[in-house]
Image (cartoon, coloured by chain):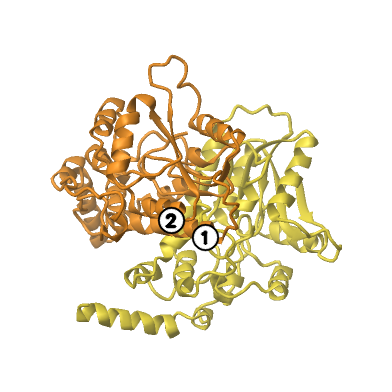
Chain colours: A orange, B yellow
């Protein structure tokens, strides 16, 4: 190995051990102070969904130079090749953090939503009031980045207690791209239906959070039975969500589209006439 | 805009207009002279699947700096959000070329194959000789990069005549990652089945090409009816391939896995117990 390359590697190793750890991220955290109101949010220039900033320009490139293919790992996740993982690989915490906080995540999300809007606008709709679009909530309609930035961007194991505490604040910012899709669909008379892994005991705060972030006029908000209803939370997310979509279909609704950040949001019949997968390299739900 | 940024943009515009066009790529093309033999190919160090080289270090980064989100477009393709496209966006020809010829494509492919091998090795197999793995051919088992490098990496419309002439040479190199999976599966007594959109009239040269590139011992090679069999080529790739997989199932085979570069290779029941999507930003088959 050339000396220069060896020095670079040493630097990167040191950075991974210290400078890019979770605690370093926390120094930059300021929660959003401005809530968007429901009606006129479209006109507000809101390029960021949080007040977090990456510490360096590009963790991805640095990681790639060190031979750590975190971008290939992320692609594997997004294309449903890498499944069943519990945490982000430790070496990729910095990469995922930079991806999420830099412009890359937003750009990737915008492409998905642009496709979804072009698709919706191309449809010849029946206009019978029964045409719906299914939205997941976490990392789809609302972003939990302020939480995950404090918890290693998914590199530390999921902690149900602390995550529920965060949800109970009702402070999660909207993912602006998804809100843009949501509002366009309302204009097209396609009714939004939220279908989430959040539980019934979180209904009130979820409604509050959604409204605070400019979501209104949904057709339904479907949550899982409360966490203590014995036996109800068994089974996979795919089974739960496809079961709920089947009920919607049985009730006479046509699922025009379906968007989520997890493959378990969009796999399993009836999937919806077309499905959209938003990026999420922070966690996996099977 | 800062002067430096304006200058960079001017440079990029000039590069896009001239320096990165298809003709520039051709200057670098040398076809592989060394064919790998069947038995001992595993031991041969073959880091490249072609003798093509990118002209610049990273088209992706340059394109991103110019505000062209070709990497987001590519992610949209790989995650099945961007569908039904006819050609690579003209602005992304350079990006896709660099992606395919640099190490990125190989790294992304390696992650997919690593997952597939780990999955196969984790299985408790019946060992009844009826356990199969479905392989697509083009951009999965064999790489047509030497052809696409001369045709804008998918930025020019598909030309059936010239592509068939290329296939008739039987010179397509293996995608080394897929060949690695193929050989590991044979060791595990999982039988490979090729299922391809190539047609019966291309059977002989396809067999020759596969053998030249170190593939042997497959259970079946399933091709589409010859191109002139009227009516036979109607319908989508999903319908054709899922129909063939159903026949395999009906014949008593268990489809352990299924790998392809197109979503139409792996969507449609029976998909196989698990599916793997290799990267391909050059073309879309629906």
Are callouts 1 and 2 both on one chain?
yes
Residue A225 or residue B191, whichever sits in front: A225
Q: Residue at x 22, y 79 (%)?
A: B4
Which quadrant of the structure image shows residue B185? Answer: top right
Q: Position of residue B251 (x, y in %)?
A: 80, 36
Q: CA distance from mark 1 to mark 2?
A: 9 Å
Residue A31 or residue B20, whichever sits in front: A31
Residue B82 shows in the view: no
| Residue sitting at the far front | A128
The reply to whether callout 1 and callout 2 are in contact (CB within 8 Å) is yes
Q: Residue at x 55, y 75 (%)?
A: B152
Q: Residue at x 47, y 42 (%)?
A: A82
Which quadrant of the structure image shows residue A107? Answer: bottom left
| Protein chain holding label 2 | A
Give the residue pinned by disc 2: A184
Q: Secondary structure at mark 2?
A: helix
Q: Is residue A116 above or below residue A17?
A: below
| Protein chain holding label 1 | A
| Residue sitting at the far top | A230
Disc ID at residue A121:
1
Q: Residue at x 67, y 74 (%)?
A: B159
Q: Position of residue A184 (x, y in %)?
A: 43, 56
């Amino acid at each position: 190995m050339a000396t220069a390359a060896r020095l670079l590697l040493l630097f990167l190793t040191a950075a991974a051990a210290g400078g890019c750890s979770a605690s370093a991220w926390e120094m930059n955290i300021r929660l959003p102070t401005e809530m968007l109101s429901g009606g006129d949010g479209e006109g507000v220039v809101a390029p960021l969904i949080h007040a977090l900033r990456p510490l360096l320009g590009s963790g991805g490139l640095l990681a790639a130079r060190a031979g750590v293919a975190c971008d290939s790992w992320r692609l594997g996740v997004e294309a449903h090749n890498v499944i069943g993982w519990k945490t982000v690989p430790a070496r990729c915490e910095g990469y995922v953090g930079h991806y999420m906080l830099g412009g890359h995540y937003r750009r990737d999300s915008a492409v998905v939503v642009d496709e979804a809007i072009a698709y919706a606008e191309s449809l010849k709709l029946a206009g019978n009031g029964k045409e719906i679009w299914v939205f997941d909530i976490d990392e789809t309609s609302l972003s939990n980045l302020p939480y995950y930035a404090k918890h290693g961007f998914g590199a530390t194991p999921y902690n149900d207690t602390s995550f529920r505490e965060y949800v109970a604040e009702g402070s999660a910012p909207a993912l602006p791209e998804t809100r843009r899709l949501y509002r366009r669909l309302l204009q097209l008379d396609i009714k939004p239906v939220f279908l989430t892994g959040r539980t019934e005991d979180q209904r009130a705060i979820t409604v509050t959070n959604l409204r605070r972030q400019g979501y209104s006029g949904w057709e339904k908000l479907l949550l899982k039975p409360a966490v203590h209803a014995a036996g109800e939370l068994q089974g996979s997310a795919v089974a739960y969500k496809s079961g709920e979509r089947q009920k919607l279909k049985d009730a006479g609704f046509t699922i025009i589209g379906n968007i989520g950040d997890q493959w378990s949001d969009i796999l399993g019949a009836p999937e919806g006439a077309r499905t959209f997968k938003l990026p999420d390299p922070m966690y996996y739900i099977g």
